[in-house]
Amino acid sequence: MELEQALRKLVLFSPALKEEIRQSCVFQKFPAGTELVRDGQFVKFVPIVIQGLVKVYTHTDEKELLLYYIQPDQSCIMSFSSCINNHGSRIFAITEEESSILLLPSNHLLRWVKDFPEINLLFYQQYDMRYSELIENIQDLLYHKLDKRLLDYLEEKVRVSGKNPVKIAHREIANDLGTAREVISRLVKKFEKQEVLKQHQEGIEILNL
């Protein structure tokens, strides 16, 4: 997808802002598994995903914790925060699949926030969405057992990827949910016996979805 096609998807942006983007931004395609930003790194670009999927997570005490996915027409609010406040990244971001991404340079973004108020609407929407997701995650941790969290996680994975079955390793699931791989393997086997899930070469399939 070319830059002009990407710009047509940014319906919130004015013609003047789009012209600035033409002159200043990078539009790039990244293979699956590409690290876009890591913890402590100063953010030079804020991404807007045009096609594909990006996973954002934290890493503490040798454990990963999934924060959110960046889907098409969405951006990374944590990268935006790091850019605006000029501090190192507090997250990792990696492409889950081949992704086409518009990269907004941080040195221009600070000015654009002042000169083009419509760009703020995009990030206000991201803040609102991520805050709602955070509340849901906290409720899951407080009130739901790991088996329900696992099913919710897999259903979300199917939703954001558009794929069922989902190609994913038990270790990756465990990292995202903050638990051990052996625990996930036991739960998957239990759900298989209950005919909730099915494992095969293509990955984990949610039945009766």
Image (cartoon, grey):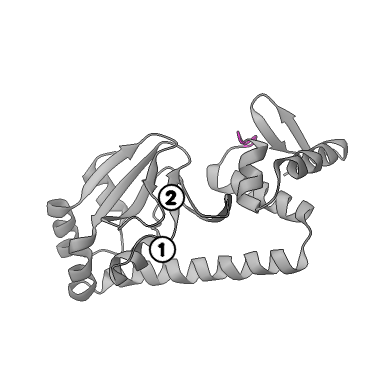
The C terminus lies in quadrant: top right
In the picture provided, is 44 more to the left or to the right than 163?
Answer: left
In the picture provided, is 81 more to the left or to the right than 200?
Answer: left
Residue appearing at x 25%, y 44% in the figure: 27
Q: Which mark is residue 78?
A: 1
Q: Residues within 10 Å of mark 1 (few under 14, many from 20)?
A: many
Q: Main secondary structure of the magenta part?
A: loop
Residue 184 painted magenta: no
Q: Residue furthest front?
A: 61
For residue 88, above or below residue 25: below
Q: Residues within 10 Å of mark 2 (few under 14, many from 20)?
A: many
For residue 193, which quarter of the picture? top right
Part of the protein shown in magenta: 164-168
Q: Count of labels shown? A: 2
Q: Amino acid at mark 1?
A: Met
Residue appearing at x 61%, y 71% in the figure: 135
Q: Position of residue 101 (x, y in %)?
A: 33, 46
- Distance between mark 2 and mark 1 Cα atoms: 10 Å
In the picture provided, is 24 more to the left or to the right than 141?
Answer: left
Q: Residue at label 2? A: 93
Viewer-proximal residue among 182 and 191: 182
Say which element carries label 1.
helix
Q: Position of residue 122 (x, y in %)?
A: 35, 66
